Image (cartoon, rainbow, N blue to C red):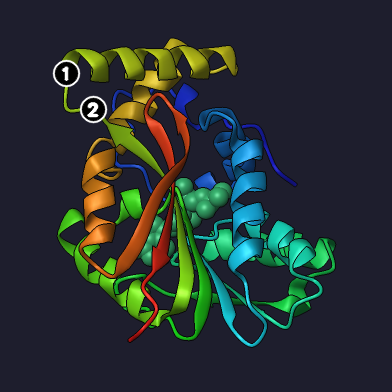
Amino acid sequence: MNERDNLFTTTEPSVGDFHFGEDVARVFDDMVSRSVPFYRELQRMVVELARMFARSGTRVYDLGCSTGTTLIQLAQACRSLDVQLVGVDNSEPMLVRAREKLAGAKCLDRCVLTNADLDDLRVENASVILMILTLQFIRPARRETLIRRLAEGLVGDGALILVEKTVSADPMVNKMFIDYYHDFKRRQGYSQLEVARKRDALEDVLIPYRLDETVELLMHNGFATVEVFFRWYNFAGILAVSRTPA
Ligand SMILES: C[S@@+](CC[C@H](N)C(=O)[O-])C[C@H]1O[C@@H](n2cnc3c(N)ncnc32)[C@H](O)[C@@H]1O
């Protein structure tokens, strides 16, 4: 059962770094749907895009699959295809919930769930790789190697689909976008204190890039086409298509 997120209502002076442990997993579905603008529509869009690139005889990966929300939609969208769905996360509490939700949606048998760190993961024979709100949690020094490895694991004309929080190069615009984002969170029922505490907890954990930095990262590491398919202030959805091997 998904609980309401009130993790940051605590009156403790310090909340510590954000961590995808049991406490977060318990409330994650409520947290993400109230913290990410257009979350449901984003899920619909990434699955629609994934379906276009998914090919029989390949794998479709969801890296940072959390509680399996996207995998359930993927299983339904790809039911006529012979694809193996692979969900990867390094949080066991998230994977426990993913297993429960996939079983409840009767699609656990379509998915392989793997507890692994993306830094150590080998991706093979993939037509689609999703990283929804996950690359931003990978240490910047490791992002280039990871993206290159993902491009190498894709079949020709395969797709990497990202959703990321972004920063703007202009401090005035950046502050404006963040203020509008915090207004959005308050409209979703979070208090000013909760918003401030979560921001502090994420400070050194979620490291957003500028949109042009992520586009460049993709273009320089094996992707021929990079298009933005979604934008809302400091959030972006990016579709990257791999080069067909010569
Ligand atoms: C914001 S959540 C992803 C949300 C999910 N993709 C969705 O669409 O609802 C980020 C996920 O990435 C996982 N994660 C973060 N760093 C990771 C790493 N280095 N290796 C594997 N999983 C990681 C976290 O445990 C968490 O479940």
Which amino acid, mark 1?
Pro
Position of 193 compared to 205: left or right?
A: right
Frontmost residue, 49 versus 112: 49
Badge 1: how crowded within 10 Å, few (<14), some, or many (20+)? few
**Dot label at residue 28:** none
Across the whole image, how many numbered discs are drawn on residues?
A: 2
**In front here: 151 or 40?**
151
Horizontal and vertical percent position of residue 25: 56, 50
User: Is residue 120 shown left or right of residue 38?
Assistant: left
- What is the x, y in percent for residue 94? 56, 59
Q: Is residue 208 visible?
A: no
Q: Quadrant of the C terminus?
A: bottom left
**Considering the numbered disc 2 on the image, is that residue within a helix, a strand or a loop?**
loop
Residue 164 picture location, percent across and down: 39, 43
- Residue 224, picture quadrant: bottom left
Badge 1 is on which residue?
Answer: 171
**Nearer to me, 211 or 146:** 211
136 versus 99 height, above or below: above
* Quarter of the figure with residue 212: top left
Q: Amino acid at mark 2?
A: Ser
Q: Which residue is at a point 41% across and 53% down the rendered structure image?
A: 134
The residue identified by callout 2 is 168
Work out whether 185 lies above or below 60.
Answer: above
Q: Quadrant of ligand 1?
A: bottom left
Q: Residue at x 58, y 80 (%)?
A: 59
- How far apart marks 1 and 2 lie (CA) works out to 7 Å
| Disc 2 crowd, CA 10 A, few/some/many (<14, 14-19, 20+) | some
Against 128, is 226 above or below? Answer: above
Residue shown at 48% from the left, 65% from the top: 159
Residue contact between numbered discs 1 and 2, judged by CB atoms under 8 Å: yes
